[in-house]
Image: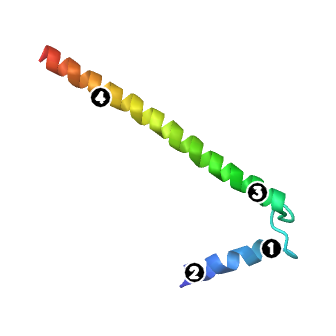
Amino acid sequence: MAMTTMLVAAPMAFAENGEGLIGKADDQTVTFFCFGVMAFFVILVIGLSLIQGALERRKERRRYDIERLG
């Protein structure tokens, strides 16, 4: 219950006459913020996929070496 109250009250505590921490939130600010969020997740997925691919290649190379030598 206390956590819910804090989550509900937090935006009101930081708002002052409708302005947040960075000033008024106009359409351009919201649009650029949303583009930033989308770009972050695209870059995150691509980066993690590249890491997973490298680890899979390493695993397959080790498996091949074990079968060849063992």
* Image quadrant where residue 57 sits: top left
| Amino acid at circle 4 | Lys
The residue drawn where x is 77% and y is 60% is 30
> N-terminal of the two: label 3 or label 2?
2
Q: Secondary structure at mark 4?
A: helix
Rendering coords of residue 28 (x, y %): 83, 57
* Image quadrant where residue 4 sits: bottom right
Q: CA distance from mark 1 to mark 3?
A: 20 Å
| Amino acid at circle 1 | Ala
* Image quadrant where residue 7 sits: bottom right
Q: CA distance from mark 2 to mark 4?
A: 45 Å
List the residue tagged with mark 1. Answer: 15
Mark on residue 59? 4
Tell me if 14 is positioned left or right of 52 in this view: right
Q: Secondary structure at mark 3?
A: helix
In the image, which is nearer the foreground, mark 1 or mark 3?
Answer: 3
Q: Counting other residues with Cα less than 10 Å from the Cα at mark 1, is it few (<14), some (14-19), or many (20 or more)?
A: few
In the image, which is nearer the foreground, mark 4 or mark 1?
Answer: 4
Q: Is residue 57 above or below residue 14?
A: above
> N-terminal of the two: label 3 or label 4?
3
Closer-to-camera residue (32/23): 32
